[in-house]
Each structure stands twice: as C-alpha cells, then as structure tokens.
Amino acid sequence: MYCEECKQRPATVHFTQVYNGKTVETHLCQQCYAQKGGIIFDVAKQLSLPNLLGSFFVSNYNLQDMKSLSRTGSCPNCGMKLSDISTTGRLGCSECYTVFEKELEPTLRRVHGDSRHVGKVPARGGEKVMVKKKIEGLKYQLQKAIAAEDYEKAAEIRDEIKDTEKKLD
C-alpha cells in the first residue's frame, strides 16, 4: 500500500479515526507524516519514558519550529540543546529549566497540570506542614525586605511570622 499523500513511498503510518460512528482510515509514509507535524515512532527504539516524554514535547511544535528552536542555543551549564531534550525527554541539569523555560512550560503544564512543583501534603498532620511552609516563605520575604531596606514591610512580615508561629503551638 502506497502513501495517500505522495503516492510514491510505501505507507508505514496508519491512522484509524472513528467519529460519530464513521470510520476514516489514513495511510501515510513517514516523510509525509512528518510534514504534517506528526511524531515519528521508530520501532527500532525501545519504548521508554524518555522517548515518551520527548514525544510530548515535540507535539507542541511542528518541524519548522523545532529547527528554529534548536538554533536558540544551548544550556551554558551542561551544553544540552532543545533538540536533545526533545529526543531524549530529559534535561541535562537544573539550569536547563531556566534556560528553556518558555519552551518547556506548555509541556509541563500538560503533563503535570502545573509548571511548578509544590509537593504533596500528608493527610494526617498536613496542617502543620502547611504552616511551616508559610513561615519559611515569610522568612524569605523578610530577608528580601531587609535587603531592600524596606523596614516597614519587614516589620509587618515579622508580625505575621509571630502570629503564624502561634498557630503551630
């Protein structure tokens, strides 16, 4: 069976869509499928989590976008390129999150529901954990206010820390 698009190469990608009871089959070669912005699954590669995550990332962009994104540079810390991330599904280091933040955010939101890790709170005793996290955040804000010499705001934050610490007892 030949590709329905170019009618020259053998069809290796086959789609079957069922919509409102109607079945539509599409048969394409890998080149035509790639031109339509599809994800090429190479059977020779093992099905692994990095490959799966890389395919999630690639699906956000068509091939022209990926070529332009690969020209944006690489991570100054580890040398990882955006194209490497899309093929392996892994980042090279923690700095990659900052360098490729704009490109990674849509994928992280789609996969995890958010682009920021907040962790889990235990069912029992979770209130204390949340209060402790709030105190840590307030202490960080206090340090920033002091560094910026905004002493009025620092005094407000200090008072809020004291009130919050009372909830722990």
Image: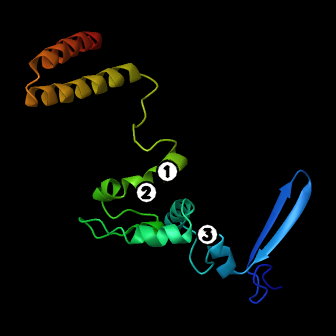
Q: Which mark is residue 39?
A: 3
Amino acid type, mark 2: Glu
Does any portion of residue 27 appear in the rendered image? yes
- Give left or right: position of 25 versus 57: right
| Identity of the residue drawn at 33% across and 65% down | 92
Mark 2 and mark 1 in contact (Cβ < 8 Å)? yes
Residue lying at the far right of the rendered structure = 21
Q: Is residue 119 above or below residue 64?
A: above
Q: Where residue 110 appears, x then y in whole percent?
A: 54, 48
| Colour treatment of the image | rainbow
Asked which secondary structure carries label 3, the reply is loop
Disc 3 from disc 2: Cα separation: 17 Å
Mark 1 highlights which residue?
106
Disc 3 from disc 1: Cα separation: 17 Å
| Identity of the residue drawn at 36% across and 58% down | 100
Mark 2 highlights which residue?
103
